[in-house]
Image (cartoon, helix red, strand yellow):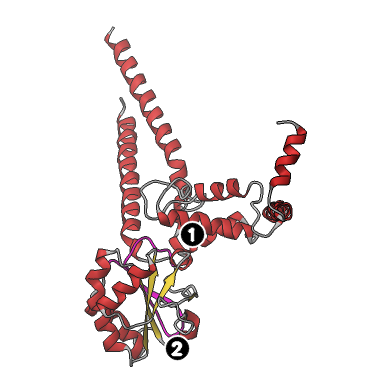
Amino acid sequence: MTATSAVRVLHRWPRGSGLLATLAVLLALGATVLATVGPGAARPGLAQQTQSVAAGLRCPVCTDLSAADSPAPLARQMRRQIQRELVAGVPPAAIRQRFVDAYGPSVLLTPPDRGWGRLVRLMPALVAGSAGLAGVLVLRRSLHRREAGR
Amino acid sequence: MSRLRRWLLLTGVVGGVAAVTLLLAVGLRSGDSQAASPLQGRAAPDFTLPGLDGGPHTAVRLSSLRGQVVVVNFWASWCTECHTEQAALNQTWQRFRNAGVVMVGVNFQDAAGDARDYAARVGASYPLVVDRSSRTALDYGLRGIPETFVVDRHGALVHRLIGPVTADRLAGLISPLLDGSAR
């Protein structure tokens, strides 16, 4: 299509369509600006921040799934709640604390670093250390026996 | 192996077993106490929720009920155990409605039409509200439904019941709050 024929095609459009098209473009631009800077605008990093907070919280109706990973409706509501509070400027630690207030410390996927939580955190290291020590003792004992047997 | 070493080894093994047993006991006990809410004894989270019928006069604000014992029951039309406890809830409402008790049914994750049909079918005549965003459910630490919370006259959350309630159990919890023998 040449430029002249394109102009002819445009001329065949109903009167007022140009105005409508201009309005549509302006509306689209307005919507884009609102979506970018308006109050409901998706803040860069908001989704990641929401996921990050949700990843540290246990889905209360699931078995060993975080609120970030669970498809359960309650976990979805938790993510929405977290996002709402982040948008409202509530710090992530305060958001986590609100869930702890309602559900107890068991809602945290990582036990808190105090009281029994600290003991639970240290337990793998304690068990591994004890097992290693027991292994060394048993090895030494069997070596001594062998030497004594020669 | 010397006698001392043998004793040390035995003490270590016994100590290890005792530690694991203690941890298991603590873990299992905390599993049992899931029914105990961390909110118990503290101010019940306030809410203002719209009525199930969508009318402007049926919204309920918990803090406006201060001075009365409030039974907050989370339910849904799709929840079979909610059907199980419905007769007990109706019975409790009829028994205590003029004695300073308000019962509030909070509809949770439900279709509005289904919830209204259900309420009409089972004859729930106490205030029914909708928690559309599940915010109230999360504030109360809800893990499933049905769950029922009892709030005393001072606005403190005093009891949490997981699963279907019975009329006797509810009456046993409400009565002491009314006659002042509790708190």
At x 35%, y 45%, the residue is B19
Q: Quadrant of residue B179?
A: bottom left
- Residue B155 within the magenta-colored segment of the rendering: yes
Residue tagged 1: A100
Residue tagged 2: B67
Looking at the picture, does residue B68 appear above or below residue A138?
below
Q: Please tell me which residue lies in front, A89 or B11.
A: A89
Tell me which amino acid carries mark 2.
Gly
Image-based side of B6 in relation to A79, left or right:
left
Specify the farthest residue to the right. A4
Can residue B160 be seen from the camera position used here? Answer: no
Place of residue A77 in the rendered image (x, y in percent of width and height, measured from the top left): 47, 58
Q: Please tell me which residue lies in front, A131 or A103.
A: A103
Place of residue A9 in the rendered image (x, y in percent of width and height, measured from the top left): 70, 41
Image-based side of A92 in relation to B6, left or right:
right
Q: Please tell me which residue lies in front, A109 or A60.
A: A60
Place of residue B52 in the rendered image (x, y in percent of width and height, measured from the top left): 40, 75
Place of residue B36 in the rendered image (x, y in percent of width and height, measured from the top left): 36, 66
The range drawn in magenta is B140-163
